Image (tube, grey):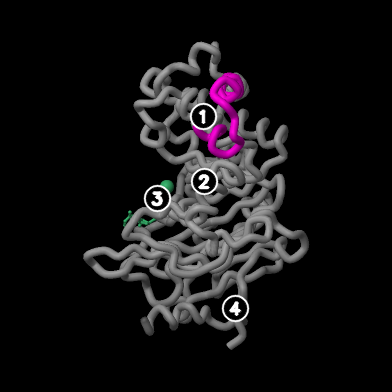
């Protein structure tokens, strides 16, 4: 059977900054090996904002951690490639990858309080990154830290630079994390739910900040969120995750206007519309996400899918281009293709 590399159609036209193919990550647990990422494939072009969405537990954070070699034990990446500027992150040594983190790829973690070191001042923490990657001395690093804090909108940065994380508010900590992630002007910033813990006004400010910084610095951004409103306002393209796989991706406008995958259709139907005031009843997707330790044999979404056919329950669909210009993994969208061979390999393990 020919091997199909499920990259997005956009990928073939322009060389992407980041190109992820067939990423698999597993955790060994008491209940056996759980495949948390199952052939994750997507790409991000230079200067592009990619929104990565999906329900809680779908694998968004593990995707970010897998890219950067930060999956906690007993988890490990078992296969796949992730090219950044032509180099495969999955083949890099521990040391090369740790040099790359913070310098080429900035990461804003989901929980800013636990991500910051409580016994170091904000300035020391930003300074450490600057010293490590750019070799800046203490006073130079401090000046740059003040400048960065100013840039992310921390008031009175020259005195706040000496504060400890607990002296910052939640919104300020999130900004400090962004300042730290941006300190070496990375090519790519991965922001994992950077605004979830914040109130709506601060959330809007942080999003504005990310948008402006991205434009100023020309970097790419992977915005991880379960909030489709954020994606609509910020992203160029969107990738939708379900049970450890990308089930659909494409330009935001196209995916929001005519979602191809029934799961994406369900997600979009479950958010209130501000333009269509006749839509007063929200539609929840019935059922729950599957247990990753016991995924259904066919499409992982089939048990919850109102449109499922017999084939959906037995054969796993591949992520393939469709007529509207995106990619989707669904038998209804691409009825003529062959099943994903990785499905058989999983059952034969
Ligand atoms: N350290 C771990 N050990 C075992 N399983 C883990 C571990 N970390 C994550 N997982 C599992 O991996 C799956 C994906 O988790 P992940 O944190 O990536 O979800 P997420 O999409 O980021 O969810 P959320 O929206 O809640 O942040 C979940 O089923 C989770 O239970
Ligand atoms: Mg997460």
Q: Which residues are magenta?
A: 128-146
Q: Between disc 2 and disc 1, whose residue precedes?
A: 1
Classify 10 Å Cα crowding around label 2: few (below 14), some (14-19), many (20 and above): many
Q: Between disc 4 and disc 1, whose residue precedes?
A: 1
> Dot 2 corresponds to which residue?
224
Q: Would you say residue 202 sits in the magenta stretch?
A: no
* Residue ID at (60%, 58%): 259
Percent x, y of residue 81: 56, 66
> Dot 4 corresponds to which residue?
335
Q: Would you say residue 139 sits in the magenta stretch?
A: yes
Q: Between disc 2 and disc 4, whose residue precedes?
A: 2
Q: Secondary structure at mark 1?
A: helix
Q: Nearer the viewer, residue 202 or 82?
A: 82
Mark number, residue 126: 1
Magenta stretch, main secondary structure class = helix
Q: Nearer the viewer, mark 3 or mark 2?
A: 2
* Residue ID at (52%, 23%): 201
């Amino acid at each position: 059977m020919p091997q199909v590399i499920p990259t997005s159609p956009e990928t073939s036209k322009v060389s992407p900054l980041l190109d992820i193919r067939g990423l698999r990550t597993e955790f060994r647990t008491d209940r056996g090996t759980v495949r948390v990422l199952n052939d994750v494939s997507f790409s991000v072009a230079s200067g592009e904002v990619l929104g990565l969405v999906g329900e809680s537990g779908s694998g968004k954070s593990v995707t970010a951690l897998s890219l950067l070699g930060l999956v906690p034990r007993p988890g490990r990446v078992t296969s796949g490639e992730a090219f950044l500027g032509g180099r495969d992150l999955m083949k890099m040594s521990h040391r090369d990858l740790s040099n790359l983190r913070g310098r080429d790829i900035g990461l804003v973690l989901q929980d800013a309080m636990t991500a910051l070191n409580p016994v170091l001042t904000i300035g020391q923490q930003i300074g450490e990154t600057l010293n490590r990657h750019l070799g800046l001395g203490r006073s130079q690093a401090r000046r740059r830290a003040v400048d960065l804090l100013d840039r992310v909108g921390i008031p009175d940065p020259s005195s706040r630079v000496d504060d400890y994380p607990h002296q910052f508010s939640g919104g300020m900590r999130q900004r400090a994390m962004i300042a730290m992630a941006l300190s070496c002007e990375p090519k790519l910033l991965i922001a994992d739910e950077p605004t979830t813990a914040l109130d709506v006004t601060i959330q809007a400010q942080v999003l504005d900040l990310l948008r402006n910084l991205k434009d100023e610095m020309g970097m790419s951004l992977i915005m991880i969120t379960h909030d489709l409103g954020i994606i609509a306002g910020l992203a160029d393209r969107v990738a939708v995750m379900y049970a450890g796989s990308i089930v659909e991706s494409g330009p935001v406008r196209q995916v929001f206007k005519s979602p191809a995958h029934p799961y994406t259709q369900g997600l979009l139907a479950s958010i209130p519309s501000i333009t269509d005031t006749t839509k007063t009843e929200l539609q929840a997707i019935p059922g729950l996400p599957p247990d990753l330790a016991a995924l259904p044999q066919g499409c992982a979404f089939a048990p919850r899918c109102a449109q499922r056919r017999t084939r959906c329950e037995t054969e796993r669909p591949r992520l393939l281009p469709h007529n509207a210009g995106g990619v989707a993994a669904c038998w209804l969208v691409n009825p003529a293709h062959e099943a994903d061979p990785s499905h058989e390999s999983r059952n034969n393990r």
